[in-house]
Image (spheres, rainbow, N blue to C red):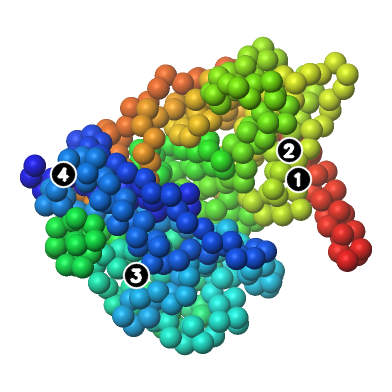
């Protein structure tokens, strides 16, 4: 082989995945290595940076072996990484302390302290205070000041791991624009740190890394990294991006009004736009830069959208335990398929672990409107409709911010995308064509596209992303069902108001008892 393979590495919460592609987008080899999470106490979730490096090294070696390729066959590589968490490096580029995962909730007091400033933070950065880099930085400054006195830069996992492959010093550490909405420190529209927000959070300027573009070459694979991975010394490494941005790019969502439904453990709807218009008023949406300059995405998500289905199967369909998940869900789909929109009056709030966008940790799940005439199929259809109606609220908010947005076309990935019933419901609620993607590599493919641009092998990344993806037939919206769902979106919003009020009352009572 010649040096024309592109390596994408997706550093996720559950696994680190590496995949090799040729310049026509064909997958040549891949490997996945489980991620090790360390839960060291209530609310504490960390990763060991050395273990993270080892996972990347093993994934790269596995992908090369699966492809039957040598390091010299790889033209360039890029990594994506988990978003919202934070870590730090010293002058030599070595990690200072662990990776503070986005799952770690110790910065709760800092999230609360920033809420009075949330509107301005959203206006500039596109994201509101949550378990993300800004509040986490405040926690480290207060709880681990000795560590931060040794730190030279705050980085995200993809930048840390790329830096280790290239031997970057702390002064050479970087961030790319796809992470800025989670920083609470940036002017995302300008791809720059905001002096106003930096002062508000009390962030030391010395910890703010340089900001580079996703396709910029940040360095080359060192001799030590080559020995650990099997790559060629001197292989170019592109800056890469956040994992959501990589997934959006890898799915070919590269034009305004193109959308991505990630029907996985979390249910994510991301809609591509050509303007940065943050949701400072409702705070229902995150607004972030895509991996491509000039394009953004508005995003909302249900924390356990897909997890709800597994919970329902285990709690209400135990007789299906002997079937594989697809077969079990096919039985449940059949029970719900012929019911009309609205499940004959049953509504479901899907926020079993709290609502994320907008942030309402006191929200919990609820079925409403069921009676003696309803059965399991009604409850299951209402569960599916709950996520779709939540998406309907997201889309309304997006269209208020972007009234010129054209007709939506939704691409879908994840296990839930295999349900024709759920796809049809989402198509009807959103009034949009709903097409599952044939390939599911997502983030790794997005990174490979960035690597191809950095290596000069791909000129038009957007066109290549669209060309590399094929769509399943999917579902088209039915005008009658879409009309029936429109008032149900309002009814669903009313149910959420009730569950939010109940949740706040419960939390207040629990605190009073304590």
User: Residue at left 58%, top 54%?
Assistant: 279
Q: Earlier in the sequence, mark 3 or mark 4?
A: 4
Is any part of residue 10 visible from this angle?
A: yes
Q: Nearer the viewer, mark 3 or mark 4?
A: 4
User: Residue at left 81%, top 18%?
Assistant: 374
The reply to whether the C-beta atoms of the residues labelled 4 and 1 are less than 8 Å apart is no
Front-most of 410 and 150? 150
Cα distance in 3D space between marks 2 and 1: 7 Å
- The residue carrying mark 3 is 174
- The residue carrying mark 4 is 69
Vertical order, 336 against 124 (above or below) = above
- Under circle 4, the secondary element is loop
- Under circle 3, the secondary element is strand
**Tag on residue 349?**
2
The reply to whether the C-beta atoms of the residues labelled 2 and 4 are less than 8 Å apart is no
**Tag on residue 364?**
1
Label 3 neighbour load within 10 Å: few <14, some 14-19, many 20+: many
Q: Nearer the viewer, mark 4 or mark 1?
A: 4
Quadrant holding the C terminus: bottom right
**Tag on residue 14?**
none
Q: Earlier in the sequence, mark 3 or mark 1?
A: 3
Cα distance in 3D space between marks 3 and 4: 30 Å
Cα distance in 3D space between marks 3 and 1: 39 Å
């Amino acid at each position: 082989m010649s040096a024309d393979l592109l390596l994408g590495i997706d550093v996720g919460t559950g696994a680190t995945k590496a995949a090799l592609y040729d310049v026509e987008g064909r997958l040549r080899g891949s490997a996945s290595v489980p991620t090790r999470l360390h839960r060291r106490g209530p609310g504490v979730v960390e990763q060991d940076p050395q273990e993270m490096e080892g996972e990347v090294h093993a994934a790269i070696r596995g992908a090369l072996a699966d492809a039957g390729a040598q390091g010299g066959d790889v033209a360039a590589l890029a990594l994506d990484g988990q978003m919202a968490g934070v870590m730090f490096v010293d002058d030599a580029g070595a990690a200072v302390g662990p990776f503070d995962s986005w799952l770690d909730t110790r910065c709760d007091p800092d999230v609360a302290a920033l809420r009075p400033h949330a509107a301005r933070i959203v206006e500039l950065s596109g994201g509101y205070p949550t378990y993300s880099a800004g509040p986490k930085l405040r926690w480290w400054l207060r709880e681990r000041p000795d560590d931060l006195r040794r730190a030279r830069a705050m980085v995200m996992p993809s930048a840390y791991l790329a830096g280790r492959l290239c031997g970057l010093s702390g002064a050479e550490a970087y961030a790319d624009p796809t992470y800025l909405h989670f920083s609470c420190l940036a002017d995302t529209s300008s791809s720059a740190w905001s002096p106003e927000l930096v002062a508000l959070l009390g962030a030391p300027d010395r910890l703010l890394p340089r900001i580079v573009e996703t396709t910029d070459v940040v360095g080359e694979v060192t001799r030590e990294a080559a020995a650990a991975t099997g790559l060629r010394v001197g292989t170019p490494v592109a800056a890469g991006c956040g994992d959501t941005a990589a997934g959006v790019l890898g799915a070919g969502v590269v034009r305004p009004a193109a959308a991505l439904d990630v029907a996985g453990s979390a249910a994510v709807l991301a809609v591509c736009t050509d303007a940065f218009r943050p949701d400072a008023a409702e705070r229902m949406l995150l607004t972030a830069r895509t991996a491509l300059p000039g394009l953004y995405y508005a995003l909302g998500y249900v924390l356990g959208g897909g997890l709800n289905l597994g919970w329902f199967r285990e709690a209400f369909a135990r007789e299906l335990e002997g079937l594989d998940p697809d077969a079990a869900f096919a039985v449940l789909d059949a029970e719900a398929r012929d019911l009309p929109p609205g499940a004959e009056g049953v509504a479901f709030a899907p926020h079993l672990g709290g609502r994320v966008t907008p942030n309402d940790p006191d929200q919990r799940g609820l079925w409403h409107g069921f009676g003696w005439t309803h059965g399991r199929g009604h409850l299951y259809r209402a569960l599916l409709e709950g996520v779709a109606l939540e998406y309907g609220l997201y889309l309304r908010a997006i269209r208020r911010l972007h009234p010129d947005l054209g007709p939506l076309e939704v691409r879908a990935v994840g296990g839930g995308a295999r349900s024709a019933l759920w796809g049809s419901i989402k198509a009807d609620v959103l009034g949009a064509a709903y097409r599952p993607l044939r390939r599911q590599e997502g983030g790794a493919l997005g990174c490979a596209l960035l690597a191809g641009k950095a290596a000069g092998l791909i000129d038009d990344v957007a066109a290549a992303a669209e060309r590399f993806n094929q769509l399943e037939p999917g579902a088209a919206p039915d005008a009658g069902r879409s009309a029936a769902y429109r008032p149900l979106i309002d009814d669903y919003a009313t149910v959420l108001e009730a569950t939010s009020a109940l949740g706040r009352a419960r939390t207040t009572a629990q605190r009073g008892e304590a």
